[in-house]
Image: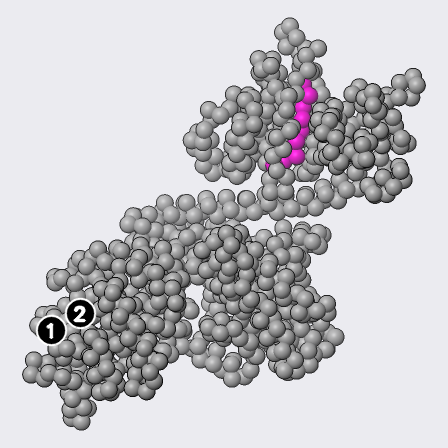
Amino acid sequence: MLASLLQELNILDCAVMVKNQDNSYRAIHSNTTWFSAIFPRGLNGEVTPENNNSVYLTDFLYDANKFWTSNLDGRINSGIWSEQTSVGLWRLEASAITQDDKKYLVIINLENEYNIRQSTLQLARELLISNDKVLEQHELIYKRIESLTYNLSNKIDLHSPIKELMEHCEFGIAMIDANMQPLAQNPALFHIFDIRENDSIAPIDIILDLCHRQFPEFQRVLNTQKKWNSEIYWIKPDTVSRWLHITICPVKDINTKLTYWLLLVTDISRVKYLQQSNEKLTYFDVMTDLPNRQFFWQSLENAMTRNSSLFVLQINIKHIKRINEAYGYAAGDEVIKTVVARLKPIIGEQSILARLGGNEFAIILYKSNEEECELVAKRLINAACEPINIINQNTCKIGLSIGASHYQNDVISAQELMRNADLAAFFGRDKKNQSIHFYSEALRLQSLRRIELEAALRVAIEDKQFELFLQPIYDLQSGNVIKAEALIRWNKPNQGLILPDEFIPIAEQTGLIVAIGQWVIKESIKLLEILHKQNIPITLSVNLSPIQIRDQQLLGIITNSVTKSEIDVASFLELELTEGVLVDDFETVQVFLTAVRKLGITIAIDDFGTGYSSLSYLQKLPIDHLKIDRSFIQELSIGHNQNAIVLAILAMAKSLNLGVIAEGVENETQQEFLRQNSCQSAQGYLFSRPLSFKQFINASDHWSTENKRPFSTLLNKENSE
Amino acid sequence: MIQKKVCIFGASAVGKTSLVNRYVAGIFNDKYLTSIGVKIDKKIVKLNDNNVQLMLWDIEGIDRYSGFNRKFIRGASVAIVVVDQSRIQSFQDGLEITRMLKQEQEIPVILVINKSDLPPADAWHSILENESPSLFEAQLQTSAKQNTGVDNLFFDVAKISLNHT
């Protein structure tokens, strides 16, 4: 019995006592030096734990007796304690056990476990304290700079005490304007990144790039102007790598308008490397128990030295942010764990699945060709995209975008391999469908083009290279122009007009859409004022992207612009949003739309019918118009199914008392169908293509004399002139 | 002789063990070594008419790796909450521990601001003033390193413990 008990307990350096019926104890295993020091034996060798020399044990016996009285099989533990006896210091733990109606008191010497636990926690706590200190230092500098700049405008005098404070600070500091352009970076920051002040790349570029890459929530932090901190890992290939603690804080003016961002950077590599003596802390992700980024890098480099054919798959789990926002971060974490559990069996024992951070994962997959790799990727996608049960019996679905890069074919270094896989994954990130993309030269060139465009866009914002074109919207009954949709065009020097399809997605990804969107609002209001002064009292409709809705400055800009105007601009301004915006971030949208509606601005839902099937938001939000997507209108003359959809939208809009605008009307049949079915208004090439403001003004001269389709007629005239 | 149980709580690395070691054994080690579990030391304090034996329960720092264990407070006459004046976070943690203690048992809690040999963290004094000092029966400054305030602390603890049965 004793042997089996000790075997079960997996211990030998212990004392075991059986509690007798008369509440006395019999020691059945106690050949230990510490036992005698704690338990003086009676004349007959009996043990009386109640008379022991250990205060802690006496306290535990109170709990033990309560437990034994319950007569339930099981065990309670005292927790570890240190006992100083005449023969030494001992690390002990006591257990009260009931088994088959027998009651045992077991005391175990946990010296080894104590030492292991102490060394693990020593490191973990040093890290914790170090982290606290970094945060406190960052907070201190933030508060000082905030107080120094509280009453300053956007222009920061870099000869001020701020500059002095920055220059003498031992950790990195950068100040960045609202468009993420650097205003100042201190010498310590350059030192951290091992670059000189006149080098082509600045520290801030590296940090923002790393943050965007490693933290999916970073853009949201910027959009919502929240304080945020985290740790990033930076590698300068072949020379240096560093762990950095980053804090980013918005500094706002007296009107709570963002003046600039303060970015604080501390090198925490030393503390991180201390952790390396503890493999579990260093190489595994706590939440998923998967290898982490560091383990993955090492495995990849090792695998490449063996020269075997392998693919690196970079995986992004889509919609986690949406799940976090809707159900909380705990639910998001559970979803990630479920996805991991589904992916692991598919990749097999030999391959390595690692969590790089947030919703980013990577796999080293030993396959010889793209076909085999694609097969695995499709299985991963299928498994991951099955519905997942979350709290309160809700289910959710996630998506995967996978980028793959092939070692041997594509690259020579691990860094390049990862970068290429990341690039391929990034390419698929915006696609609605689950997808795998392989890195290729074409993809690289496409990426380069994006980077160039992004840089050019920044210049375009500064140099005001944008122009608004107006596409008239017709009242189908009267034939009069009642509105116009403002559409942005980019007059790129030496290249001519660039359409929004090409640059808006990049602007959205980079956050530049916020600045562009603000310009569009201001410019639209300016054009409205001119139109009204010229006796053209129409409404202008302006598109808003999802990112703009989360721009906390937007409402202030609209309110300021509208109230400053000499005319009642708000009554002639309409904002267009897509269905996806409403569903993605309902609460933010509700607050925003209610506020703009109070100003007198109307709201239209763009591309209606292409988005989500849930229409409950139509009743909950202050919406005025639906714009039927052009894809339904184009099919009107052909298929009965599309006719049914358009009729259903018209009927629904009527019942909800909403106006309807048909987009993309290109022929008489479509126009006639819409008019006969009481669609109020329409736009499209049948009437007019988008016109420059000057063309629009010229065309308006003829509106009073022309009745139907004046714009197409006029446009043809203008074009032929 | 009267025995009194005194529990010593606080965040990690605020100096709980250092205070006990300084008081009981008269020693101090500058190197931080994290404690695991509980260690109980005893020392007799001579008051006017009484000798009080303090049973000093030095409890592992409360942080994300080790939570608050309510059973430790059972039978205690006084709780000491130690904070490190060079780390504001340790004060925030100390306040949280005190609230948990008060929820568990009505017991006098003494705030010990340790490491008085180090400069206080920025805004330490204003935070200390603002953040509910009424929670504490007494507030003392100590430096286990320089051996300042330590004897006074445990003398006061003994006095307070006698008033709490």
Determine whether A114 is above or below A227 in the image: above
Q: Main secondary structure of the magenta part?
A: strand
The magenta-colored residue range is B54-62
Q: Badges 2 and 1: C-beta atoms under 8 Å apart?
A: no
User: How many discs appear?
Assistant: 2
Q: Are marks 2 and 1 on the same chain?
A: yes
- From the viewer's side, name the closer residue of B116 and B1: B1
* Residue placed furthest toward the left: A705
Helix, strand, or loop for circle 1?
loop
User: Which amino acid type is shown beneath numbered disc 1?
Assistant: Ile
Quarter of the image with the N terminus of chain A is: top right
In the image: residue A653, left or right of residue B107: left
Residue visible at 51% across and 59% down in the picture: A395
Chain under disc 2: A
Image spot of residue B123 (x, y percent): 45, 36
Asked if one can make out residue A685 in the rendered structure from this viewpoint, the answer is no
Residue visible at 50% across and 61% down in the picture: A396
Helix, strand, or loop for circle 2?
strand
Find disc 2 in the rendering and name its residue.
A539
Determine whether A151 is above or below A660 in the image: above
Residue visible at 71% across and 72% down in the picture: A303
Say the numbered circle drawn on residue A567: none
Chain under disc 1: A
Instruction: Locate residue A336: give its quadrant.
Output: bottom right
On whether residue A669 falls in the magenta region, the answer is: no
Image spot of residue A510 (x, y percent): 41, 68
Instruction: Locate residue A550: give its quadrant.
Output: bottom left
- From the viewer's side, name the closer residue of A569 and A396: A396
Find disc 1 in the rendering and name its residue.
A536
In the image: residue A519, left or right of residue B72: left
Residue visible at 68% across and 38% down in the picture: B34
Mark 2 packing: few (<14 Cα in 10 Å), some, or many (20+)?
A: many
